Amino acid sequence: MLKSTCNAFAAALVFICVASARAEEGNPALGQKLAQEWCAKCHAIGLYGDSPLKVAPPFRELHQRYNVEDLAESFAEGIIVGHPTMPVFRFDPDQIQNLIRYLKTLER
């Protein structure tokens, strides 16, 4: 049991490192498209404007709360925290790179 837990932890750690490194390779335009499709119903995803759902933080402020590269694991495993009405979803590694790269463009 301990060995499988350690293996799972090691795999998650490797994924986080790879996803963080690969985020620089992502396509911010595809990340913006993904954000528009999955997130814009609740979050402000651009440089301006309020979030449609008041409890959903604007994406341009996420870097003030988190190192956005650290969100890779949550995007892969499914975000189950956030605002109470936030759906659970999972992204594949390419989508994660793209979304993180887009989030990095919003850091001002």
Image (cartoon, rainbow, N blue to C red):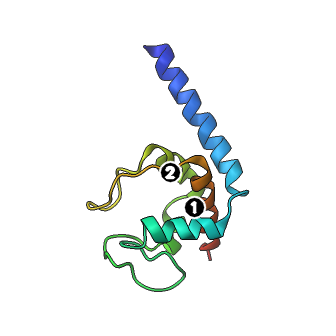
N-terminal-most mark, 1 or 2? 2
Pointer 2 residue: 91
Mark 1 vs mark 2, CA separation in Å: 9 Å
Vertical order, 14 against 67 (above or below): above
Q: Which residue occupies the extreme right position in the image?
A: 25
The secondary structure type at the circle numbered 1 is helix
Tag shown at residue 87: none
Pointer 1 residue: 99
Residue 29, position as x, y percentages in the image: 64, 70
At x 46%, y 15%, the residue is 2
- Where is the N terminus found, in terms of image quarters? top left
Verify CB contact (< 8 Å) between mark 1 and mark 2.
yes
At x 65%, y 67%, the residue is 28
Residue 60, position as x, y percentages in the image: 52, 74
Q: Would residue 47 be visible to someone looking at this image?
A: yes
Q: Residues within 10 Å of mark 1 (few under 14, many from 20)?
A: many
The secondary structure type at the circle numbered 2 is loop
Q: Residues within 10 Å of mark 2 (few under 14, many from 20)?
A: some
Name which residue type carries label 2. Phe
At x 57%, y 54%, the residue is 96
Q: Which residue occupies the extreme left position in the image?
A: 84
